[in-house]
Image: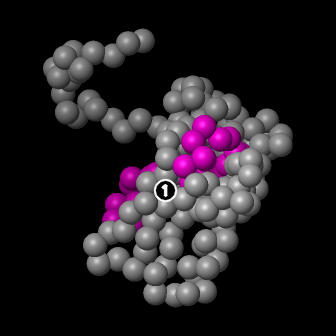
Amino acid sequence: MAMDFNKALSTKMEDVQRPPNPPIGHYVFQVAKVPAMTQKEGSDYQIVEFSVKGVSVFEDANDVDADELKAYGKVTNILTRKTFLFNTTDDAAFATTLFQLRTFLADHLQIEGAQEMSMNEALNASVNKRFVGELRHRPDKNNPEVVYAEVGRSAPVA
């Protein structure tokens, strides 16, 4: 059903509810765009964030609740992120996250020729690549009633 914002303007605020999160479980995801690299002012962390969209349920895992998915909608409506946090004050933690990012790019996204690329080249080549990801729910640390859907562990599609 097509939605019309002009019609939505007459909706009472109390009638607007937070839509359900997609159910937890394993899905095939696709990288939607070049990852964003940010650092919040005053933070010790640099962030590499992949915007990903759902492609399909990963049937081999058989762990996505069909009724919850029906209530949510299409898998292709899932828009979420896969995030890597780089601790800029701890060399060992930074190196660990860098290795995890390398593994994600080369092994999970299976970017052709990734081993010979710079990290920047591999990040740019990640667009439209697919992987299996475990969708999980994480409560907001400031408001536990708000729950985010995000990708945790990942693996290659095949």
- Quarter of the picture containing the C terminus is top right
**Residue 22 place in picture, x, y as percent:** 55, 39
Residue found 75% across the figure and 38% down from its top: 58
Residue found 67% across the figure and 71% down from its top: 99
* 44 w.r.t. 67: above or below: below
Q: Closest to the observer: 14 or 66?
A: 66
- Quarter of the picture containing the N terminus is top left
Hey, which quadrant is residue 92 in on the image?
bottom right
Q: Which residue is mark 1?
A: 49
**Circle 1 sits in a helix, a strand or a loop, which is it?**
strand
For the rendered model, the colour scheme is: one colour
* 35 w.r.t. 57: above or below: below
**Residue 94 place in picture, x, y as percent:** 56, 79
**Residue 137 place in picture, x, y as percent:** 54, 53
Q: Closest to the observer: 7 or 31?
A: 31
Q: Amino acid at mark 1?
A: Glu
Q: Is residue 100 magenta?
A: no
The answer to whether residue 123 is visible is yes
Instruction: Tell me the crowding category of disc 1: few under 14, some 14 to 19, or many 20 or more residues within 10 angstroms, Cα based.
Output: some
**Residue 103 place in picture, x, y as percent:** 71, 62
Residue farthest front in this picture: 116
Magenta range: 123-151
Hey, which quadrant is residue 53 in on the image?
top right
* 27 w.r.t. 50: above or below: above
**108 sits to left or right of 87:** right
Q: Is residue 132 magenta?
A: yes
